[in-house]
Amino acid sequence: MGTPVSLPDDQVRELARLFPGVQQADDGGVTFFLIPQLSLPAGCTPERVDALLCPTARDGYPSRLFLSEQVRSRSWSTARILERNWYTVSWRIREGLRPAQMVLAHLDAFK
Amino acid sequence: MSPEALVRIPRLLYDRVAADLRRPHRVAFERVGFLSCAAASAGGATQVVLACDYHAVDDSHYLDDPGSGARINADAIRVAMQRVMDSKRGAFHVHLHGGRGLPSLSRMDQEELPRLVNSLRAVGPRVPHGILLLSGDSCAAWVWTPAAAGAVAARVTIVGHPMDLIHPGGSTAREALERFSRQSFLGPGAQSTIAQVRIGVVGLSGGGSHIVQQLAHLGVKRFALFDADVVDESNLNRMVGATAADARAKTPKAEVGKRVITAVSPDVELVTHMGRWQDRPELLRGCDLVFGAVDTFAGRRELEVACRRHMVPYIDIGIDVHRVGDEPPRMAGQVILSIPGGPCMFCLGFLTEERLAQEAAEYGAAGPRPQVVWSNGVLASTAVGVCVELLTDWTRARDRPVYLSYDGNAGTVTPHVRLKYLTARTCPHYRLEDVGDPIVRSVIP
Protein backbone atom coordinates (compact mmCIF):
# COMPACT_ATOMS: atom_id res chain seq x y z
CA MET A 1 0.00 0.00 0.00
CA GLY A 2 1.41 3.37 -0.94
CA THR A 3 0.21 6.91 -1.22
CA PRO A 4 -2.59 7.82 -3.65
CA VAL A 5 -1.53 7.43 -7.25
CA SER A 6 -1.32 10.29 -9.69
CA LEU A 7 -1.73 9.16 -13.30
CA PRO A 8 -0.53 11.10 -16.33
CA ASP A 9 -3.05 13.66 -17.47
CA ASP A 10 -3.46 12.17 -20.96
CA GLN A 11 -4.30 8.76 -19.51
CA VAL A 12 -6.93 10.24 -17.23
CA ARG A 13 -8.44 12.23 -20.11
CA GLU A 14 -8.56 9.08 -22.22
CA LEU A 15 -10.37 7.29 -19.41
CA ALA A 16 -12.86 10.14 -19.16
CA ARG A 17 -13.40 10.15 -22.94
CA LEU A 18 -14.20 6.45 -23.05
CA PHE A 19 -16.19 6.38 -19.84
CA PRO A 20 -18.05 9.66 -19.40
CA GLY A 21 -18.76 10.62 -15.81
CA VAL A 22 -15.71 8.83 -14.40
CA GLN A 23 -14.69 10.16 -11.00
CA GLN A 24 -11.86 9.42 -8.62
CA ALA A 25 -11.51 9.00 -4.86
CA ASP A 26 -9.00 7.71 -2.35
CA ASP A 27 -9.53 4.98 0.22
CA GLY A 28 -6.94 3.56 2.56
CA GLY A 29 -4.12 5.22 0.66
CA VAL A 30 -5.24 3.90 -2.73
CA THR A 31 -6.73 5.88 -5.63
CA PHE A 32 -9.79 4.38 -7.33
CA PHE A 33 -11.71 5.43 -10.43
CA LEU A 34 -15.48 5.21 -10.19
CA ILE A 35 -17.26 4.61 -13.51
CA PRO A 36 -21.00 5.11 -13.19
CA GLN A 37 -23.22 2.76 -15.16
CA LEU A 38 -20.52 1.02 -17.13
CA SER A 39 -21.89 -0.92 -20.13
CA LEU A 40 -21.12 -4.62 -19.81
CA PRO A 41 -20.55 -7.13 -22.63
CA ALA A 42 -23.60 -8.57 -24.36
CA GLY A 43 -25.42 -11.21 -22.37
CA CYS A 44 -24.69 -9.74 -18.96
CA THR A 45 -27.57 -9.03 -16.64
CA PRO A 46 -27.85 -6.28 -15.66
CA GLU A 47 -26.44 -4.60 -18.74
CA ARG A 48 -25.01 -1.65 -16.81
CA VAL A 49 -23.47 -1.45 -13.35
CA ASP A 50 -21.29 0.97 -11.45
CA ALA A 51 -17.66 -0.08 -11.66
CA LEU A 52 -14.56 0.75 -9.68
CA LEU A 53 -11.12 0.50 -11.19
CA CYS A 54 -8.09 0.02 -8.98
CA PRO A 55 -5.27 0.81 -11.43
CA THR A 56 -2.53 -0.31 -9.04
CA ALA A 57 -1.54 -3.71 -7.68
CA ARG A 58 -4.02 -5.22 -5.26
CA ASP A 59 -4.33 -8.72 -3.81
CA GLY A 60 -1.67 -10.00 -6.16
CA TYR A 61 -3.32 -8.64 -9.31
CA PRO A 62 -1.69 -5.80 -11.26
CA SER A 63 -5.08 -4.04 -11.35
CA ARG A 64 -8.66 -4.91 -10.45
CA LEU A 65 -12.14 -4.00 -11.58
CA PHE A 66 -14.94 -4.15 -9.02
CA LEU A 67 -18.63 -4.13 -9.92
CA SER A 68 -21.58 -3.00 -7.86
CA GLU A 69 -23.50 -6.19 -8.71
CA GLN A 70 -22.73 -9.77 -9.70
CA VAL A 71 -23.50 -10.10 -13.39
CA ARG A 72 -22.91 -13.72 -14.32
CA SER A 73 -22.84 -16.95 -12.40
CA ARG A 74 -19.19 -17.43 -11.56
CA SER A 75 -17.02 -17.27 -8.46
CA TRP A 76 -17.20 -13.79 -6.96
CA SER A 77 -15.41 -12.31 -4.03
CA THR A 78 -16.50 -9.23 -2.15
CA ALA A 79 -14.70 -6.06 -1.18
CA ARG A 80 -15.68 -2.97 0.73
CA ILE A 81 -14.18 0.15 -0.82
CA LEU A 82 -15.19 3.78 -0.49
CA GLU A 83 -17.96 2.79 1.90
CA ARG A 84 -19.67 0.58 -0.69
CA ASN A 85 -19.79 -3.18 -1.15
CA TRP A 86 -18.31 -4.38 -4.43
CA TYR A 87 -17.89 -7.69 -6.24
CA THR A 88 -14.96 -8.91 -8.27
CA VAL A 89 -13.76 -12.02 -10.03
CA SER A 90 -10.37 -13.62 -10.28
CA TRP A 91 -9.18 -12.14 -13.58
CA ARG A 92 -5.62 -11.21 -14.34
CA ILE A 93 -4.80 -8.78 -17.11
CA ARG A 94 -1.34 -7.96 -18.36
CA GLU A 95 0.69 -5.23 -16.76
CA GLY A 96 1.58 -1.90 -18.33
CA LEU A 97 -1.85 -1.02 -19.71
CA ARG A 98 -3.35 2.45 -19.63
CA PRO A 99 -6.39 2.83 -17.32
CA ALA A 100 -8.87 2.82 -20.22
CA GLN A 101 -7.25 -0.32 -21.60
CA MET A 102 -7.39 -1.89 -18.15
CA VAL A 103 -11.16 -1.45 -17.98
CA LEU A 104 -11.64 -3.01 -21.43
CA ALA A 105 -9.33 -5.90 -20.58
CA HIS A 106 -11.16 -6.58 -17.32
CA LEU A 107 -14.49 -6.61 -19.17
CA ASP A 108 -13.24 -9.57 -21.18
CA ALA A 109 -13.93 -11.63 -18.05
CA PHE A 110 -17.65 -11.21 -18.67
CA LYS A 111 -17.77 -12.08 -22.37
CA MET B 1 -35.84 8.73 18.11
CA SER B 2 -33.94 11.64 19.64
CA PRO B 3 -30.95 12.86 17.64
CA GLU B 4 -27.50 11.94 18.85
CA ALA B 5 -24.19 13.47 17.82
CA LEU B 6 -20.72 11.99 18.20
CA VAL B 7 -17.79 14.34 17.68
CA ARG B 8 -14.35 12.77 17.20
CA ILE B 9 -11.13 14.75 17.28
CA PRO B 10 -7.65 13.26 16.87
CA ARG B 11 -5.57 14.03 19.93
CA LEU B 12 -2.79 15.66 17.91
CA LEU B 13 -5.30 18.02 16.35
CA TYR B 14 -6.98 18.69 19.69
CA ASP B 15 -3.65 19.57 21.29
CA ARG B 16 -2.88 21.88 18.37
CA VAL B 17 -6.22 23.65 18.84
CA ALA B 18 -5.72 24.03 22.59
CA ALA B 19 -2.21 25.40 22.09
CA ASP B 20 -3.40 27.90 19.51
CA LEU B 21 -6.28 29.12 21.67
CA ARG B 22 -3.91 29.74 24.58
CA ARG B 23 -1.78 32.18 22.60
CA PRO B 24 -2.23 35.73 23.87
CA HIS B 25 -3.73 38.33 21.55
CA ARG B 26 -3.06 42.06 21.43
CA VAL B 27 -6.68 43.12 22.07
CA ALA B 28 -8.74 39.98 22.72
CA PHE B 29 -8.83 38.02 25.98
CA GLU B 30 -9.65 34.80 24.17
CA ARG B 31 -8.85 33.35 20.78
CA VAL B 32 -11.17 31.81 18.24
CA GLY B 33 -10.67 29.22 15.53
CA PHE B 34 -12.67 26.97 13.24
CA LEU B 35 -12.47 23.21 12.95
CA SER B 36 -13.17 21.69 9.56
CA CYS B 37 -15.21 18.55 10.02
CA ALA B 38 -16.24 15.62 7.86
CA ALA B 39 -19.45 13.77 8.51
CA ALA B 40 -20.88 10.28 8.46
CA SER B 41 -24.11 8.68 9.53
CA ALA B 42 -24.13 6.08 12.28
CA GLY B 43 -27.68 5.06 11.49
CA GLY B 44 -31.01 6.38 12.71
CA ALA B 45 -30.62 9.90 13.97
CA THR B 46 -26.98 9.51 14.98
CA GLN B 47 -24.58 11.93 13.31
CA VAL B 48 -20.83 11.34 13.43
CA VAL B 49 -18.66 14.46 13.12
CA LEU B 50 -14.96 13.97 12.38
CA ALA B 51 -12.62 16.90 12.94
CA CYS B 52 -9.94 16.91 10.26
CA ASP B 53 -8.34 20.36 10.19
CA TYR B 54 -8.03 23.54 12.22
CA HIS B 55 -7.89 27.14 11.08
CA ALA B 56 -6.95 29.88 13.50
CA VAL B 57 -8.69 33.22 13.05
CA ASP B 58 -6.23 35.73 11.69
CA ASP B 59 -4.88 38.20 14.26
CA SER B 60 -6.22 41.12 12.25
CA HIS B 61 -9.76 39.72 12.28
CA TYR B 62 -10.36 40.42 15.98
CA LEU B 63 -12.27 43.53 17.12
CA ASP B 64 -11.18 45.55 20.12
CA ASP B 65 -14.21 44.99 22.36
CA PRO B 66 -13.55 45.12 26.13
CA GLY B 67 -17.10 43.86 26.72
CA SER B 68 -16.41 40.36 25.35
CA GLY B 69 -13.66 37.80 25.61
CA ALA B 70 -13.18 37.69 21.86
CA ARG B 71 -15.11 39.31 19.07
CA ILE B 72 -14.24 38.49 15.48
CA ASN B 73 -15.12 40.65 12.51
CA ALA B 74 -17.09 39.93 9.36
CA ASP B 75 -13.93 39.02 7.44
CA ALA B 76 -13.26 36.13 9.82
CA ILE B 77 -16.78 34.83 9.28
CA ARG B 78 -16.56 35.30 5.52
CA VAL B 79 -13.33 33.27 5.44
CA ALA B 80 -14.99 30.48 7.43
CA MET B 81 -18.03 30.50 5.13
CA GLN B 82 -15.86 30.44 2.02
CA ARG B 83 -13.95 27.46 3.42
CA VAL B 84 -17.22 25.59 3.95
CA MET B 85 -18.23 26.24 0.34
CA ASP B 86 -14.84 25.23 -1.07
CA SER B 87 -14.20 22.16 1.07
CA LYS B 88 -17.77 20.84 1.47
CA ARG B 89 -16.82 20.27 5.10
CA GLY B 90 -18.69 21.44 8.17
CA ALA B 91 -17.24 24.16 10.38
CA PHE B 92 -17.15 24.36 14.16
CA HIS B 93 -16.51 27.62 15.99
CA VAL B 94 -13.91 26.86 18.67
CA HIS B 95 -12.91 28.89 21.70
CA LEU B 96 -11.60 28.27 25.18
CA HIS B 97 -12.90 29.22 28.62
CA GLY B 98 -10.79 29.05 31.73
CA GLY B 99 -11.41 26.64 34.57
CA ARG B 100 -11.71 22.90 34.69
CA GLY B 101 -14.45 20.35 34.02
CA LEU B 102 -17.23 20.40 31.49
CA PRO B 103 -17.43 23.99 30.17
CA SER B 104 -20.66 25.81 29.40
CA LEU B 105 -21.46 28.59 27.00
CA SER B 106 -21.67 32.12 28.37
CA ARG B 107 -24.85 34.13 27.89
CA MET B 108 -23.17 36.06 25.11
CA ASP B 109 -22.07 32.79 23.46
CA GLN B 110 -25.64 31.51 23.62
CA GLU B 111 -26.95 34.64 21.98
CA GLU B 112 -24.36 35.13 19.28
CA LEU B 113 -22.86 31.78 18.29
CA PRO B 114 -26.07 30.13 17.03
CA ARG B 115 -26.40 33.06 14.59
CA LEU B 116 -22.87 32.44 13.37
CA VAL B 117 -23.59 28.73 12.98
CA ASN B 118 -26.70 29.56 10.97
CA SER B 119 -24.51 31.56 8.57
CA LEU B 120 -22.34 28.48 8.13
CA ARG B 121 -25.41 26.30 7.60
CA ALA B 122 -26.64 28.65 4.92
CA VAL B 123 -23.57 27.98 2.78
CA GLY B 124 -23.15 24.33 3.75
CA PRO B 125 -26.64 22.97 4.36
CA ARG B 126 -25.73 19.30 3.80
CA VAL B 127 -23.05 19.01 6.49
CA PRO B 128 -23.17 19.45 10.25
CA HIS B 129 -21.79 22.61 11.85
CA GLY B 130 -21.48 23.65 15.45
CA ILE B 131 -19.56 24.91 18.42
CA LEU B 132 -16.67 23.36 20.33
CA LEU B 133 -15.83 24.90 23.68
CA LEU B 134 -12.69 23.92 25.58
CA SER B 135 -11.91 24.27 29.26
CA GLY B 136 -8.57 23.66 30.93
CA ASP B 137 -9.09 19.89 30.96
CA SER B 138 -12.29 19.10 29.11
CA CYS B 139 -14.55 20.25 26.31
CA ALA B 140 -18.14 20.35 25.13
CA ALA B 141 -19.66 20.45 21.66
CA TRP B 142 -23.02 21.34 20.17
CA VAL B 143 -23.92 20.06 16.73
CA TRP B 144 -26.47 21.39 14.24
CA THR B 145 -27.19 18.48 11.93
CA PRO B 146 -28.59 19.13 8.44
CA ALA B 147 -31.92 17.62 9.46
CA ALA B 148 -32.40 19.20 12.88
CA ALA B 149 -33.52 22.74 13.55
CA GLY B 150 -31.69 23.09 16.87
CA ALA B 151 -28.44 22.05 18.43
CA VAL B 152 -27.67 18.66 19.93
CA ALA B 153 -25.23 18.40 22.84
CA ALA B 154 -22.63 15.96 21.52
CA ARG B 155 -20.54 13.24 23.03
CA VAL B 156 -16.93 14.18 22.29
CA THR B 157 -14.13 11.66 21.88
CA ILE B 158 -10.52 12.75 21.81
CA VAL B 159 -9.08 9.92 19.74
CA GLY B 160 -5.59 8.96 20.75
CA HIS B 161 -3.68 7.08 23.37
CA PRO B 162 -5.32 7.54 25.83
CA MET B 163 -8.83 8.17 24.56
CA ASP B 164 -11.02 10.72 26.30
CA LEU B 165 -14.75 10.15 26.16
CA ILE B 166 -16.59 13.26 27.24
CA HIS B 167 -20.30 12.88 27.79
CA PRO B 168 -22.43 16.04 27.67
CA GLY B 169 -24.09 15.02 30.91
CA GLY B 170 -20.77 14.42 32.66
CA SER B 171 -20.21 11.15 34.51
CA THR B 172 -23.02 8.66 34.01
CA ALA B 173 -21.81 5.71 36.07
CA ARG B 174 -24.63 4.41 38.26
CA GLU B 175 -23.05 1.09 39.08
CA ALA B 176 -23.14 -0.50 42.45
CA LEU B 177 -19.67 0.14 43.77
CA GLU B 178 -19.41 -3.40 45.06
CA ARG B 179 -19.29 -5.00 41.63
CA PHE B 180 -16.30 -2.98 40.45
CA SER B 181 -14.56 -2.38 43.77
CA ARG B 182 -11.67 -4.68 42.82
CA GLN B 183 -10.86 -2.62 39.73
CA SER B 184 -11.13 0.82 41.30
CA PHE B 185 -7.35 1.19 40.89
CA LEU B 186 -8.10 1.98 37.24
CA GLY B 187 -8.88 5.53 38.30
CA PRO B 188 -11.75 7.65 39.60
CA GLY B 189 -13.42 8.18 36.21
CA ALA B 190 -12.55 4.79 34.77
CA GLN B 191 -15.79 2.96 35.49
CA SER B 192 -17.85 5.79 34.05
CA THR B 193 -15.76 5.72 30.87
CA ILE B 194 -16.08 1.95 30.62
CA ALA B 195 -19.84 2.22 31.02
CA GLN B 196 -20.11 4.92 28.34
CA VAL B 197 -17.90 3.44 25.64
CA ARG B 198 -19.65 1.72 22.75
CA ILE B 199 -17.62 -1.26 21.58
CA GLY B 200 -17.97 -3.21 18.38
CA VAL B 201 -16.79 -6.80 18.16
CA VAL B 202 -16.47 -8.37 14.72
CA GLY B 203 -16.15 -12.15 14.82
CA LEU B 204 -17.63 -13.91 17.83
CA SER B 205 -16.14 -17.34 17.69
CA GLY B 206 -12.78 -18.28 19.23
CA GLY B 207 -11.29 -14.89 20.08
CA GLY B 208 -14.41 -12.71 19.97
CA SER B 209 -16.38 -14.87 22.40
CA HIS B 210 -13.70 -14.39 25.06
CA ILE B 211 -13.60 -10.67 24.35
CA VAL B 212 -17.32 -10.06 24.82
CA GLN B 213 -17.38 -12.12 27.99
CA GLN B 214 -14.53 -10.11 29.51
CA LEU B 215 -15.98 -6.77 28.40
CA ALA B 216 -19.25 -7.66 30.12
CA HIS B 217 -17.43 -8.45 33.36
CA LEU B 218 -15.43 -5.26 33.00
CA GLY B 219 -18.63 -3.19 33.00
CA VAL B 220 -18.96 -2.26 29.33
CA LYS B 221 -22.60 -1.43 28.71
CA ARG B 222 -22.84 -0.65 25.03
CA PHE B 223 -22.14 -3.24 22.38
CA ALA B 224 -22.45 -3.86 18.66
CA LEU B 225 -21.85 -7.52 17.80
CA PHE B 226 -21.25 -8.83 14.29
CA ASP B 227 -21.03 -12.38 13.06
CA ALA B 228 -22.68 -13.98 10.06
CA ASP B 229 -22.12 -17.53 11.24
CA VAL B 230 -23.97 -20.06 13.35
CA VAL B 231 -22.57 -22.36 16.00
CA ASP B 232 -21.57 -25.80 14.86
CA GLU B 233 -19.86 -28.74 16.53
CA SER B 234 -16.39 -27.64 15.46
CA ASN B 235 -16.76 -24.33 17.37
CA LEU B 236 -17.27 -26.00 20.74
CA ASN B 237 -13.55 -26.54 21.27
CA ARG B 238 -13.03 -22.80 21.81
CA MET B 239 -16.16 -20.65 21.71
CA VAL B 240 -16.96 -19.41 25.21
CA GLY B 241 -20.67 -19.59 25.99
CA ALA B 242 -21.57 -21.95 23.15
CA THR B 243 -23.20 -25.22 24.15
CA ALA B 244 -23.89 -28.56 22.54
CA ALA B 245 -27.50 -27.43 22.27
CA ASP B 246 -26.38 -24.36 20.30
CA ALA B 247 -24.46 -26.58 17.89
CA ARG B 248 -27.54 -28.75 17.39
CA ALA B 249 -29.83 -25.74 16.97
CA LYS B 250 -27.36 -23.81 14.80
CA THR B 251 -27.73 -20.78 17.07
CA PRO B 252 -26.28 -17.63 15.52
CA LYS B 253 -22.94 -16.77 17.14
CA ALA B 254 -24.13 -13.22 17.71
CA GLU B 255 -27.02 -14.61 19.75
CA VAL B 256 -24.58 -16.56 21.92
CA GLY B 257 -22.51 -13.41 22.44
CA LYS B 258 -25.60 -11.50 23.46
CA ARG B 259 -26.58 -14.26 25.88
CA VAL B 260 -23.13 -14.29 27.50
CA ILE B 261 -23.16 -10.51 27.95
CA THR B 262 -26.70 -10.18 29.26
CA ALA B 263 -26.15 -13.01 31.73
CA VAL B 264 -23.52 -10.82 33.37
CA SER B 265 -25.16 -7.43 32.75
CA PRO B 266 -28.86 -7.51 31.90
CA ASP B 267 -29.05 -3.73 31.50
CA VAL B 268 -26.79 -3.32 28.46
CA GLU B 269 -27.51 -1.44 25.25
CA LEU B 270 -26.72 -4.06 22.64
CA VAL B 271 -27.24 -4.48 18.92
CA THR B 272 -26.43 -7.67 17.07
CA HIS B 273 -26.04 -8.16 13.37
CA MET B 274 -26.20 -11.75 12.26
CA GLY B 275 -24.47 -11.03 9.01
CA ARG B 276 -21.41 -9.30 7.61
CA TRP B 277 -20.56 -5.97 9.23
CA GLN B 278 -20.21 -4.61 5.70
CA ASP B 279 -23.98 -4.91 5.37
CA ARG B 280 -24.59 -2.75 8.46
CA PRO B 281 -21.59 -0.40 8.35
CA GLU B 282 -23.45 2.36 10.16
CA LEU B 283 -23.43 0.25 13.32
CA LEU B 284 -19.64 0.10 13.18
CA ARG B 285 -19.36 3.87 12.65
CA GLY B 286 -21.24 4.46 15.87
CA CYS B 287 -18.70 2.48 17.91
CA ASP B 288 -15.97 4.22 19.90
CA LEU B 289 -13.66 1.24 19.58
CA VAL B 290 -13.72 -1.96 17.53
CA PHE B 291 -12.24 -5.39 18.14
CA GLY B 292 -11.57 -7.56 15.12
CA ALA B 293 -11.29 -11.32 15.53
CA VAL B 294 -11.49 -12.25 11.86
CA ASP B 295 -9.75 -14.95 9.87
CA THR B 296 -8.32 -13.19 6.87
CA PHE B 297 -5.84 -10.44 6.08
CA ALA B 298 -8.30 -8.95 3.59
CA GLY B 299 -10.94 -8.89 6.32
CA ARG B 300 -8.54 -7.06 8.62
CA ARG B 301 -7.69 -4.55 5.91
CA GLU B 302 -11.38 -3.76 5.37
CA LEU B 303 -11.97 -3.31 9.07
CA GLU B 304 -8.98 -1.04 9.49
CA VAL B 305 -9.97 1.05 6.46
CA ALA B 306 -13.49 1.51 7.87
CA CYS B 307 -12.21 2.31 11.36
CA ARG B 308 -9.62 4.79 10.12
CA ARG B 309 -12.19 6.52 7.94
CA HIS B 310 -14.36 7.09 10.99
CA MET B 311 -11.60 7.70 13.54
CA VAL B 312 -12.31 4.55 15.50
CA PRO B 313 -9.42 2.76 17.24
CA TYR B 314 -9.19 -0.85 16.09
CA ILE B 315 -7.75 -3.76 18.06
CA ASP B 316 -6.88 -6.81 16.01
CA ILE B 317 -6.24 -10.30 17.30
CA GLY B 318 -5.37 -13.42 15.42
CA ILE B 319 -3.59 -16.70 15.63
CA ASP B 320 -2.08 -19.14 13.21
CA VAL B 321 -0.43 -22.55 13.43
CA HIS B 322 2.36 -23.44 11.01
CA ARG B 323 4.04 -26.72 10.28
CA VAL B 324 7.48 -26.96 8.76
CA GLY B 325 8.71 -30.45 7.93
CA ASP B 326 8.97 -32.72 10.93
CA GLU B 327 9.24 -29.85 13.40
CA PRO B 328 6.50 -29.55 16.03
CA PRO B 329 3.70 -27.15 15.04
CA ARG B 330 4.46 -23.48 15.74
CA MET B 331 1.61 -21.44 17.17
CA ALA B 332 1.92 -17.68 16.82
CA GLY B 333 -0.44 -14.75 17.07
CA GLN B 334 -0.70 -11.03 17.44
CA VAL B 335 -2.52 -8.20 19.18
CA ILE B 336 -2.34 -4.90 17.33
CA LEU B 337 -3.78 -1.54 18.28
CA SER B 338 -4.43 0.65 15.26
CA ILE B 339 -5.15 4.19 16.40
CA PRO B 340 -6.16 6.80 13.82
CA GLY B 341 -3.11 8.95 13.13
CA GLY B 342 -0.70 6.35 14.51
CA PRO B 343 1.00 3.45 12.72
CA CYS B 344 -1.44 1.25 10.82
CA MET B 345 -1.15 -2.48 10.19
CA PHE B 346 0.75 -1.72 6.96
CA CYS B 347 3.16 0.59 8.82
CA LEU B 348 3.75 -2.20 11.34
CA GLY B 349 4.53 -4.68 8.58
CA PHE B 350 1.69 -6.97 9.62
CA LEU B 351 -0.34 -6.35 6.49
CA THR B 352 1.64 -6.49 3.29
CA GLU B 353 0.68 -6.69 -0.36
CA GLU B 354 2.55 -10.00 -0.48
CA ARG B 355 0.45 -11.51 2.31
CA LEU B 356 -2.76 -10.23 0.76
CA ALA B 357 -1.72 -11.58 -2.63
CA GLN B 358 -0.84 -14.97 -1.20
CA GLU B 359 -4.13 -15.15 0.64
CA ALA B 360 -6.06 -14.19 -2.49
CA ALA B 361 -4.21 -16.88 -4.45
CA GLU B 362 -5.20 -19.48 -1.87
CA TYR B 363 -8.81 -18.28 -1.76
CA GLY B 364 -11.11 -21.19 -0.99
CA ALA B 365 -8.26 -23.66 -0.70
CA ALA B 366 -6.92 -22.87 2.78
CA GLY B 367 -9.40 -25.09 4.63
CA PRO B 368 -10.30 -24.63 8.30
CA ARG B 369 -7.64 -22.81 10.32
CA PRO B 370 -6.34 -24.38 13.51
CA GLN B 371 -7.78 -22.68 16.63
CA VAL B 372 -7.58 -23.58 20.30
CA VAL B 373 -9.28 -22.19 23.34
CA TRP B 374 -6.25 -21.32 25.46
CA SER B 375 -4.45 -19.26 22.85
CA ASN B 376 -7.69 -17.50 21.91
CA GLY B 377 -8.10 -16.73 25.60
CA VAL B 378 -4.57 -15.34 25.97
CA LEU B 379 -4.92 -13.08 22.96
CA ALA B 380 -8.42 -11.92 23.88
CA SER B 381 -7.33 -11.14 27.46
CA THR B 382 -4.33 -9.23 26.18
CA ALA B 383 -6.52 -7.28 23.76
CA VAL B 384 -9.01 -6.39 26.50
CA GLY B 385 -6.08 -5.19 28.59
CA VAL B 386 -4.99 -2.95 25.71
CA CYS B 387 -8.54 -1.61 25.50
CA VAL B 388 -8.69 -0.85 29.23
CA GLU B 389 -5.36 0.94 29.09
CA LEU B 390 -6.55 2.99 26.14
CA LEU B 391 -9.75 3.99 27.92
CA THR B 392 -8.42 4.61 31.41
CA ASP B 393 -4.71 5.44 30.99
CA TRP B 394 -4.09 3.50 34.18
CA THR B 395 -0.49 2.61 33.30
CA ARG B 396 0.19 6.07 31.79
CA ALA B 397 2.10 4.34 28.98
CA ARG B 398 0.96 6.90 26.46
CA ASP B 399 1.63 6.96 22.74
CA ARG B 400 3.21 3.54 22.79
CA PRO B 401 2.53 1.62 19.57
CA VAL B 402 0.99 -1.72 20.44
CA TYR B 403 2.04 -4.70 18.35
CA LEU B 404 2.30 -7.71 20.63
CA SER B 405 3.58 -11.02 19.44
CA TYR B 406 2.28 -14.27 20.92
CA ASP B 407 4.45 -17.35 20.92
CA GLY B 408 2.06 -20.17 21.70
CA ASN B 409 4.84 -22.74 22.04
CA ALA B 410 6.77 -20.71 24.61
CA GLY B 411 3.63 -19.21 26.17
CA THR B 412 4.90 -15.64 25.91
CA VAL B 413 3.50 -12.31 24.77
CA THR B 414 6.18 -9.76 23.91
CA PRO B 415 6.44 -6.52 21.92
CA HIS B 416 6.95 -7.45 18.29
CA VAL B 417 10.49 -7.12 17.00
CA ARG B 418 9.30 -4.86 14.17
CA LEU B 419 8.57 -2.11 16.68
CA LYS B 420 12.33 -1.63 17.01
CA TYR B 421 12.47 -0.59 13.39
CA LEU B 422 9.40 1.61 13.43
CA THR B 423 10.77 5.06 12.71
CA ALA B 424 7.61 7.12 12.21
CA ARG B 425 4.94 7.46 14.84
CA THR B 426 2.47 8.75 12.26
CA CYS B 427 0.84 6.92 9.36
CA PRO B 428 1.38 7.94 5.73
CA HIS B 429 -1.36 5.63 4.44
CA TYR B 430 -4.48 6.97 6.10
CA ARG B 431 -4.78 10.72 5.67
CA LEU B 432 -6.90 12.93 7.88
CA GLU B 433 -8.41 14.55 4.79
CA ASP B 434 -9.93 11.20 3.77
CA VAL B 435 -12.10 10.75 6.87
CA GLY B 436 -15.88 10.65 6.74
CA ASP B 437 -18.09 10.01 3.76
CA PRO B 438 -15.86 9.55 0.70
CA ILE B 439 -15.29 12.63 -1.39
CA VAL B 440 -15.58 11.65 -5.03
CA ARG B 441 -14.21 14.19 -7.47
CA SER B 442 -14.34 14.61 -11.20
CA VAL B 443 -11.17 13.52 -12.97
CA ILE B 444 -11.40 16.44 -15.39
CA PRO B 445 -11.19 19.79 -13.56
Image (tube, coloured by chain):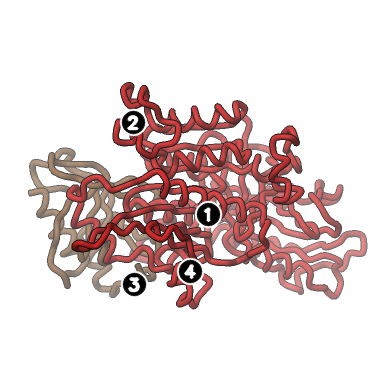
Chain colours: A brown, B red
Label 3: which residue? A6
Give B280 or B433, whichever is nearer the viewer: B280
- Disc 2 residue type? Val
Q: Which mark identifies residue B427?
A: 4
1 or 3: mark nearer the eye? 1
- Mark 4 or mark 1: which comes first in sequence? 1
Residue B142 in view in this figure: yes
- Chain at numbered mark 3: A
- Chain at numbered mark 1: B
Q: Residue B226: where, in percent of width, then height? A: 42, 38
Label 1: which residue? B313
For the N terminus of chain B, the image quarter is: top right
- Disc 1 residue type? Pro
Q: Is residue A100 above or below residue A71?
A: below
Q: Is residue B244 above or below residue B48?
A: above
Marks 2/4: CA–CA distance: 37 Å
Badge 2 element: loop
Q: Residue A65: where, in percent of width, then height? A: 22, 55
Marks 2/3: CA–CA distance: 44 Å
- Mark 2 or mark 4: which comes first in sequence? 2
Name the residue rendered at 83%, 67% in the picture. Answer: B63
Badge 4 element: loop
- Chain at numbered mark 2: B
- Disc 3 residue type? Ser
2 or 3: mark nearer the eye? 2
Q: Which mark identifies residue B230?
A: 2
Name the residue rendered at 28%, 60% in the picture. Answer: B356
Marks 4/1: CA–CA distance: 14 Å
Is disc 2 surrounded by few (<14), some (14 to 19) or many (20+) residues within 10 Å? some
